Amino acid sequence: MSKFTKTLLALVAFAGVFMGSASESFAGGRLPGSLLVYPVYLSDGSGTTCINITNTWDAPTYNPNTNLDGVLDVHFIYIDGHYWTEFNRFERLTPNDTFSTLASDHNPNSEYGFLYCIALDPVSQQPVDRDYLVGDELVLDSSNGAFYQINAWAFSGVSGDGNPTDVNGNGRLDLDGSEYEQVADKMILASFIGDYVPSGLKPYLVLVSLLCSSDFESTLDFQVYNNNEQEFSATHKIRCWDIVRLADIDNVFTETFLQTTQNANELAAQTGWARIDGDRAVDIVGNEPMVNDPPFLGAHFTTSFFGHLLHETKDRNSTDGCLDALL
């Protein structure tokens, strides 16, 4: 039995311990894309992550001896969540092919962070508009007592099927509506359970900045609502990537605070929801001007058994997101 199979079976066994008879909870799906962003990988001993990616391109004319019809090369870029360094891998996916790997095996040089995958033309090795990639991941976060499956964000190419996506030739993946689809203006945390230590249920956010430079620190504004429609506010700063417990963002996310706002006839467990908006980003090195409305992505998980991508508003962000390609 391979190391990958043994680890995957261990993940499933761990999930059984934490989930019991609870139903599985999965992130909402999106259409296949040319760029996938996985919100988190853990491989530092405090967690393990199984990365899955599939080429859904069904190409009946594919022949491994004569042509590359339906073939996509995929560039994996792991971004270290502490030093913001990159680690690169390349994998070839033939039509209807799927690939799974443990982050610790695929990227031995980094312990945690986020990952994105780019569809490449198998001949030119350049990013290409081929909206056939889908992916998800299994995350075992033993330090936070969490095990969850979560989808990757899929961004479609908009340069035209089969065309290179680096339209402006800057070597970056621009989420600007001309290379890849734009990012939503705001993220929505549809619901959260009030953070309460004795219950063991602790809600977390995973946040990914989509400003190319890690020198920028983005301030995110939170409009938080309890289950009586009362509004509260909070802020949180991120540079490149962050996993943060909601209680560490602000007291408004805690059961103790929410209980002070409840009606007498409500259940003890308190819930709420939040709207998250990028306010501004400041270059902490001091070389660049301030950026308004910084783009970002977010995901949510709660100990001990579920996670999902944040919902998105329909309007698009006024500041275009980007990711480095560095081919």
Image (spheres, rainbow, N blue to C red):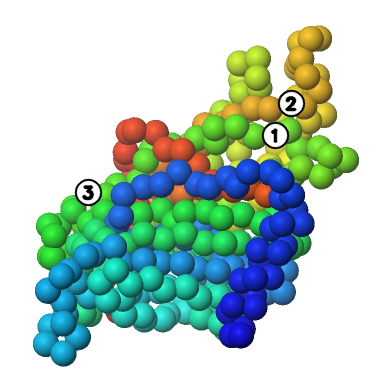
Decide if residue 263 is on the left or right side of residue 68: right
Q: Are marks 2 and 3 in contact (CB under 8 Å)?
A: no
Residue named by callout 2: 270
Disc 1: CA contacts within 10 A as few (<14), some (14-19) or many (>=20): some
Residue named by callout 3: 177
Residue named by callout 1: 193
How many marks the image carries: the answer is 3
Q: Are marks 2 and 1 in contact (CB under 8 Å)?
A: yes
Amino acid found under the numbered disc labelled 3: Gly
Q: Compared to 90, does 142 lie above or below? A: above
Q: SS at mark 2? A: loop
Disc 2: CA contacts within 10 A as few (<14), some (14-19) or many (>=20): many
Q: SS at mark 3? A: loop
Amino acid found under the numbered disc labelled 1: Ile
Decide if residue 60 is on the left or right side of residue 23: left
Quadrant assignment for the N terminus: bottom right
Q: Compared to 113, does 124 lie above or below? A: below
- Label 2 vs 1, first from the N-terminus: 1
Question: Who is closer to the viewer here, 189 or 306?
Answer: 306
Q: Which residue is drawn at 74% across and 26% down?
A: 270
